[in-house]
Image: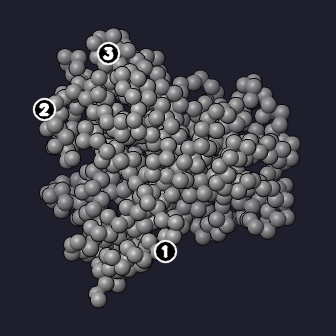
Amino acid sequence: MKREEILDGLREGPKVDVCVIGGGINGISVFRELALQGLSVLLVEKHDYCSGASSALSRMVHGGLRYLENGEFKLVKESLVERDRLLRNAPHYVAPLPTTVPVFDIFSGLGNGIVRFLGLSRRPSRRGAIAIKAGLGIYDFLTRKRALMPRHQFRGRRKTLEKWPALNPAIKSSATYFDAWVSHPERLGIELLQDGLSANGEARALNYAELRRDTGGGYVLEDRIGGASVAVEPALIINATGGWIDIANETLLSPQARPAPLVGGTKGSHLIVDNADLYDALAGHMIYYENEDGRICILFPYFGKVLVGSTDIRVDDPETVRCEADERDYILQSLAFVLPDIAIRREDIVFQFSGVRPLPASNDSFTGRIPRDHFCTVVEPGDGNPPVLCMIGGKWTTFRSFGEMAADMALERLGKTRSVETVDRPIGGGRGFPENATIWLSQLAARTGLSGERIAALFSRYGTDAADVATFIVAGADTPLPHDGYSTRELQFLINAEAVDHLDDLLLRRTTLAVSGELSLDMVDASLDVLAREKRWTPARCASERSRFLTLLSERHGVDESMLAARNEPRSTECDITAKSG
């Protein structure tokens, strides 16, 4: 449905079973779960889908090795199960990630690990070989029945430095195990959303909209694009706004009904670094290492660059988080410790991002000790308005199980039962994923007339949904764009099929152009031209949108206009974007 159709439908019938507030990965997950059960469900997102913490994750899909020393065995077990489900259900975006832990001691961390496990210590400490071996042994034990990936192995110092010669020579050994990574987390969120929307005509979703209490005590939906307001009468509200839960409760609940603070978020910042020596030094692995202060950091290959992170800092306002200079210095200092001979220049940082982990409210002095588990609590307003179910905590890996938990609570409240399971339900471009991709790609190339190279690029971006994109591309006149591999028709498809309302929706979340460091100023302007034509914007509206995007890119992601201009290249005249002749 288009925005006006959704708003008109609500004007005609404002009653819905559930209104989900928050279009991040957890909100979309519970929306999908409820839509699949046939409920009338409305999803409302204040900004764009997956534009908050759900776009600022470390790109890891993992069990949480370090959570073991906090005693969070249930969470680690659940996370490993969900990781393996994602490997099966979303193979186009989630893939195995060999992970290597440099070890600088043998016995370090044993004593402190025990007292931390017992809750008697808050400070981080170095983990030695024995402590790491114990943790990886638990990892292997928890996945022994599925065994989708190899068991862990240790290497001595000599073999470690043979494979990774740039590592700090002070290491004693290394341990390698397998977790997973997600290439397009925001796109996976869009696919979950589309799964719910396509399954149920009573399922509706709006980005750039907000639910508020009106002066009469009921609820009104405000459209932040067109400016319209419509009344909404939900039987249940689900607050899935993550780090914004307490802020959202202020708009949903009367002062008398608001609970004590439920979340206490911490900020995690990451850098995308374009440095060939750093990329080569990883040898295809993620390096999972401790900084000198004992905090965990990561770096791994990501779209030809290297993703490095992360920090863990308390924040009060999730709306304004960005990677600050001291965080960037901390991350680079951690890199210099683990890979001392590789120099990173400021200009090597091609993108940066920061998000808020929606952790439960806690007074713990060490943020690493705050539980990473998830749970739901229900607030009864007591004023005739519907109850508000708050989804608290949650890591990206467990979005499905968390959404399932919240949906089951909602179903019970509404006196309904579950009819559809999502445990083994493929996601988006993971449906019908071919065992032999080469044959699938060649067949699609033959059917559409696009080159094998272009089809492969579409497959890497959309999985088996590449067939729909390719069919759309060849159905009309196409033109090249400044970035090889993208074309006007592909962007038109995304704009019209995936609720794109701003330039950052397109360039930050529906594509990986910005996060991969491949976005140029020419591509910004060309993409804006396509979007403006589709939206029928005036020149003044285009200028405003351009300014908005460039400001956002500079202030939030450390990419200014001069950096974008430096990436401009002469437009290729041989980019294959249309059907081959003959």
The residue where tag 3 is placed is 254
Residue 338: quadrant of the picture: bottom right
Q: Earlier in the sequence, mark 2 or mark 3?
A: 2
**Residue 177: mark:** none
Q: Earlier in the sequence, mark 2 or mark 1?
A: 2
Asked if residue 123 shows in the view, the reply is yes
The residue where tag 2 is placed is 12
Asked if residue 336 shows in the view, the reply is no
Question: Closer to the camera, 407 or 116?
Answer: 407
**Residue 516 x/y as whole percent:** 47, 62
Q: Residue at x 65, y 49 (%)?
A: 146
**Residue 211 x/y as whole percent:** 27, 30
Dot 1 alpha-carbon crowd within 10 angstroms: few under 14, some 14 to 19, many 20 or more: few
**Residue 229 x/y as whole percent:** 17, 32
Q: Which of pointers 2 and 1 indicates the residue nearer the eye?
A: 1
Question: Closer to the camera, 70 or 513?
Answer: 70
Up-down relation of residue 525 to residue 418 (above or below): below
The amino acid sitting under disc 1 is Thr
Question: Closer to the camera, 431 or 503?
Answer: 431
